[in-house]
Amino acid sequence: MAVLKAKDLAVGYESQAVLDNINFEINSGDYFCIVGENGSGKSTLMKTMLGLISPVSGEISFAEGLEKNEIGYLPQQSDVQRDFPASVYEIVLSGCQNGLGKRFFYSKEQKALALDNIKKMGIEKLKSRCYRELSGGQQQRVLLARALCATKKALLLDEPVAGLDPQVTEEMYELIKQLNDDGMTIIMISHDLVNVQNYATKIFDVNSMKVTTIKADKEGK
Amino acid sequence: MLDQLFMYLSFPFVRYALIVGVLIALCSSLLGVTLVLKRYSFIGDGLSHVAFGSLAIATVLNVTNKMLIVLPLTIAFAILILRKGKNAKIKGDAAIAMLSVGALAFGYMIMNLFPSSSNVAGDVCSTLFGSTSILTLTQEDVWISGILSIIVIGIFILFYNRIFAVTFDEDFANAVGTKANAYNLLIATVIAVIIVLAMNLVGSLLISALVIFPALSAMSILKSFRSVTIFSAISSTICALLGILISILAGTPVGSTIVTVDVILFGICYLIGKIRG
């Protein structure tokens, strides 16, 4: 079952294509990795998938009941967030914003969901800590918990292990793997080829524009 | 001294002025955190000069209610700046600097070309630095300011969660389907309203202080968005109250007195923050 389909897609800014001739299909339950060097247009491609920027040409379509408010997103950290006074709980809860609908405040269920995801990511003890005081790995867990509040189906991650040390990187990959095992579709950008080959089921290389399917490894891991 | 204070407080217009002053201080502190964190501080400053320019136009046109001209013009520029400023950061800065000094020069010029009273220097001074005393506000000003403040506070409370979401991470908000641009527009409009309101209290040059100081004080000692917001609101209210009372008793200009109290509080909070590490 295809969740996301790109057909003759070209992405870029202000009608200047950074990448073109993109064709792929992501199925439900896939662990789909987009690899390539820095500056090769991976983030631009992901922003297009998210609808933050419109495609230069071609089309990208969500299929079979995946609504825009059922996607979770883990962006790269921005400058603003580095000195933002917000508690872990506040940030995770903000992941429920797509479920607000016409209401102004979060419901009891949404608050419980936020707490659940905080537990799932193993950051319960940090619940009332200030985000800017956390380590890089802890911050990523917070943002992952927030993304989980927004989705049950598909998660888009932009360089989730950038700047983390090997030990924390390993933990982060395990967490994401677990989510994938639970049925979450994972779409991830990375330039960490070694780890990607251990975990992904499909790899899309932006240099060759080819999708490689890795199935055998999945059973073993 | 207390006798003097009670004597003043026995006049209803003094009490009204006090209430309005406090309400204005409260709502100007609410969006301070958002402004500081979104790097919009300079937008507040630019807008206050635009408000000065539009006030000059309103004065020259001699309309009975100046708000009718100042408010829409300031809101229009707020939206314009926000739209333009987002794409190119440095250019946006320069554009705002141009706009703000331009509006200032233009306003001062037309006030001199078409003087509406014999005391142009006095008029200009009170628009820039606020009325020498809040007690010179007209009854109508007091009512409009009171109502607008309550609307601003209401909007902030209702949209608190969304304002937080959009301030913390605009890309995430957009990605999960929140219309971040619409909320940026809402924030810009509210900022414009606050600036026009605060102009009555502290004058156009000092408005940014009223918006930014309470937020910075709170951010240097507190760690969650909610506590920072509540602390800014309370501290801004207390500073305004103290400032107004001191200015009544000591005869100092109300705007600069309030801002001085705000600055002192910031100094204290900053030190506490540094000591606690």
Image (cartoon, rainbow, N blue to C red):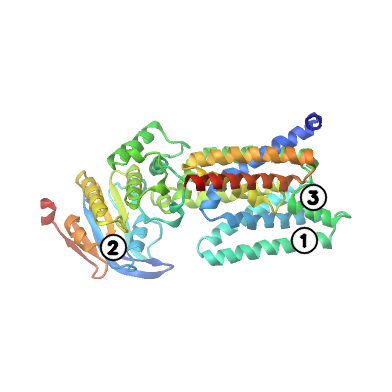
Residue A7's disc is 2
Q: Find residue B183 and report its horizontal and vertical position in percent.
A: 51, 48
Q: Is residue B46 visible to the viewer in this orientation of the structure?
A: yes
Is residue B68 depicted above or below B77 in this figure?
above
Compute the Cα span from label 2 to label 3: 60 Å
Q: Secondary structure at mark 2?
A: strand
Front of the two marks 3 and 1? 1
- Expressed as whole percent of the image width and height from the top left, the position of residue A122 reads 28, 41
Circle 3 chain: B
- Write down the chain letter for disc 1: B
| Residue displayed at 46% across by 54% down | A80
Q: CA distance from mark 1 to mark 2?
A: 59 Å
Q: Nearer the viewer, mark 1 or mark 2?
A: 1
Which image quarter is the N terminus of chain B in? top right
Q: Residue furthest right?
A: B118
Inspect the image, locate mark 2, and give the three-letter code of the amino acid beneath it.
Answer: Lys
Image coordinates for residue A46, horizontal then vertical, percent: 33, 59
Q: Which residue is mark 1?
A: B108
Exactly how many numbered labels are in the figure? Answer: 3
Where is B44 relative to B145, above or below?
below
Q: Which mark is residue B234?
A: none
Q: Residues within 10 Å of mark 3 (few under 14, many from 20)?
A: few
Residue indicated by mark 3: B63
The reply to whether residue B200 is in sight is no
